[in-house]
Amino acid sequence: MELENKIKTVTEAFKEKMVEHIESEENEERKRILQKALDRGMELLEGR
Amino acid sequence: MKFLTITLRGIRNFDQRRIQFQDGLNIICGPNESGKTTIVDSLLFSITEEGQNVRDLIQWESDHSSITLQYETDEGETYTLTRTLYPQEKSTLENSRILEDEGAIRSMLKDHFGCVSRIVLENSAVVKHNEMEIMRKMGSRDIIREQIQAFLTGGTKRSPEKVMEILERSIFQIDRALIDIDNEIEHELQNLQRYIEFIEKYEELIKKKAVYQEDKTHFEELLDTYKDRVRYGSLVQEIKSLEKVRDQVEDIESYIQSIPFEKVKEIEDLHRKLEEIEERTRTIITIIEKMERELEKLLKEQEKTRNFLSRILGPLLGKSTSSEEIRKKIKTIEDILERDRMYLATLKHERQEIQDRIRALEIEIGDFRGKPYEELIRIKQEKQREKGVILEGRTMEEIATLVSQKGSERDELRITIFSRNPDLLEKDEDTVKKKLEELEQRIAWLVDEIENIGPELEEARTGKEEAERINGRLTNLRSQKEELNMKKEVDEIARKTLEEVYTGLKEKFIPQLQKRAGTIFEKITGGKYTELVIREEDLEVFVKTPGRLLSSNTPGQGHEDQYLSLKIAHSALSQGTKDQLYLSLRIALSDIVSGGKALPLIFDESFYTSDESRLKETFAVLQHIAQTNQILLFTHNEEFLHYGNPIVLAPGG
C-alpha cells in the first residue's frame, strides 16, 4: 500500500521548526533565545 | 524488503555462523545462550549502527569481528552490508558498486529501510520479550499509546505530552517565582526610600571633607613655607647678631692692637730723657753762666792787670794775680765754656730731636696722646673685659662656625622659599608672622571642621551602605527576574513549537496509522472489525464493528456512534482480538516507518508465557501477516518450529 511521505518524528520536526525560526530571525538577542528554546526542547525530549 | 542471510564472525558466542532466512514466517529456535538475542542485536546494529557498546558484540580474543547482512529490497535488488568491528571499525555496502562512506551508507540504508533509528525500529518492527503478555497484563491501551508515542517522538526518553507538561509546570513555577520577586522588589524599593537621602548626603559630606582636607594640606604646605620664612628671618637676625659680635670683638681687638704701648712708653722715656736733658741743660747753663761770670771777672781782672795801678796796688791789696794765670784761667774757662757750650748745643740738639720725636710720636698715637702707659694698660683690660662680655663665653672660632652653619642653613632655606614663593623673601617679618598666625588659625579651624564632619559622615556612610546593599539586592533581583523572564520565554517558545509540531504530526500521522492499521486489522480479523479510531488528544485506540458499536461503559450493548476503548472493552473484545489489534498497529507502524516497504518483523521471545490456545490464535495471525511481511520469530520453544521455516541454533552458538 502506498503511503504518504514518510513521517518525521517529533524530535526531527521540532528541531526542524526551531532551526527554521532561528535562521529566519534577524535579531541576535531573539536568535539566542530561540536557540535556547531548541536546546531546552531537545534536552527534555531526550530525557536529560 | 526481506533479509536473506546474516553472517556473524567473532561476534559474542559465534566464531563464524551464517543463517539463511526464507520468505514468510521464520522460526529461529535455540535454548538460552544459543545466540538469539545476539542475532537480533546484530540485525539492528547492522541497519542502525546503534545499540549497546560496540565492544559488547566483539568476541573475546577474536582477531576479527564482523557482521554481514544480505537483504533484498522491494525492487528485487540484493545488497550486502558488512560492519567490521575489529580489528578496526569499517562499513561497506555492496550492490553493483561498493560504498564505504558512512554518510552515503546511512543514506542508502534510510532509503531501503525507511528509518535507521534503532529505537524507532524497536518500537515498530521488533516485538520484544513477552511484550504481548505485558500488554495484556498492564493494559494494552497504555502500551499502544506508548508505541505510537515512541514512534512519533523518534524514541525520545520523554513523550511530547510529558515534555509539554514539564514546560507548563516550569512556566507556572517561573510565574510564581516572578510574583515573589516582584514582591521582594517592591519591598526593597520601599526600604530604599528610607536610605536614599543618605547617598546624596554622603557624597556631599565626602566632597566637603575632601575640600577641607585639600585646603588643610595646602595651608599646611603654606605654613611650612612661612615657618621656613620665619626661621630664615631668625637666622638672618642671628647671623647679623653674630656678625655684630664678631665685628665688635674684631673692633675691640683692633682697638687693643692699635693701643700704642711702645710709642707711649717711648714718649714717656723721651720725656724722662728730655727732663734729664733739661736738667743737664739747666746745669750747663748755670755752669756756663757761672763760667761766663767768672770769665767776665777774669777779663775784668785781666783788664785790670793791664791797668798800672792795678799792677802796683794789686800786691798791696793781696791780690797778687799774675796775668799769666789769669790768661790761663781765662783760657781754661774759655775752653770749658766752649766745651760746655758745645755740650749745651748738643743737649739742645738732642732736646730738639727728642721734642721732634715726641711730637711725631704724639701725632702717631693720636687720641692716646696724653694718656700714660698705665692708662693704656687699664684701657686694654677694660676692652678685654668688654670683649668677654660680648663673646658671652664663646670663642671667635665658635662664632665663626656658628656664622658658617647658620649661613648654610639660611642659604638652603632661601632656595627652598624662593622655589615655593619668591615674593615671600621680600616681605617684612611682621607681615610674615601675622600671616603665619592666620594660617595656624585657619588650619586649626579646618581640623575642627573635619572632626565635626566625622559623626555625620559616619551616619551618612552607614545609610549609604545600606542603600547600596539594597540596590545590590535590587540589581540581583532584577537580574534574576530578567533571567526568569528569559527562561519563561524559552519554555513558552519550546512548548508552543513542540505543541505545534506534535499536533501537526499527529494530524498527519494518526490518520495514516489509523487507516493502515484498520486495513490490516480488518484483514486479520476477517472483516469482523472494519475500522480503527485513534483519538488524537490522548492516542486512545477504539475499534468499530460493522453496524454494531459497543458502548465504552456498557459492555455487550450497542450504542450508535459510541466507541469502545481497548481496556474497557476487555469483556467485549477477546484477548485474541486485542492481540490482533496490537499486531495490526505494530505492523502499521512498521509500514509507516519504512514508508510502505513492508519491513521484516522480528519477534524476540514475544509469546513465551502465552498458553497454547492463545499461541494458536497468534500464530494464525502471524502466518497471515507473513504473507506480506517477512517474520523472524526467535524462541526457545521447539514446539513453534512447525509454524514456519525452522532455523535451529545449537547451544553456545
Image (cartoon, coloured by chain):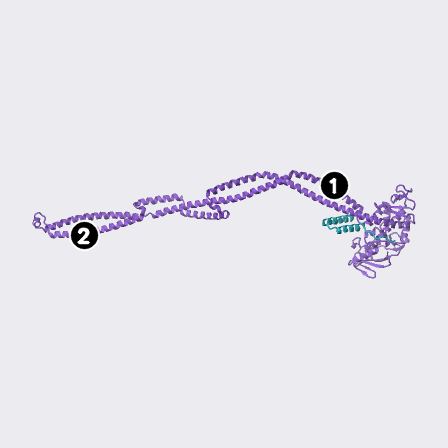
Of the two numbered discs 1 and 2 on the same chain, state the one appearing first in sequence.
1
Residue B28 shows in this picture: no
Give x and y (percent) for residue B490. Answer: 75, 47
Residue B183 shows in this picture: yes
Real-space Cα separation, disc 1 to disc 2, in angstroms: 163 Å
Query: SS class of the residue under badge 2?
Result: helix
Give x and y (percent) for residue B329. Answer: 14, 51
Q: Residue at x 24, y 51 (%)?
A: B350
For the colour purple, the matching chain is B
Q: Is residue B71 above or below residue B224?
A: below
Q: Amino acid at mark 2?
A: Glu
Residue sticking out furthest to the bottom: B96
Q: Residue at x 36, y 47 (%)?
A: B253
B443 and B539: which one is in front?
B443
Q: Amino acid at mark 1?
A: Arg
Q: Residue at x 26, y 47 (%)?
A: B272
Query: SS class of the residue under badge 1?
Result: helix
For the colour cyan, the matching chain is A
Q: Residues within 10 Å of mark 1 (few under 14, many from 20)?
A: few
Q: Is residue B53 left or right of residue B253?
A: right
Q: Is residue B524 left or right of residue B379?
A: right
Where does label 1 land, which residue?
B176
Q: Which mark is residue B338?
A: 2
Give x and y (percent) for residue A47. Answer: 78, 48
Q: The residue marked by circle 2 belongs to what chain?
A: B
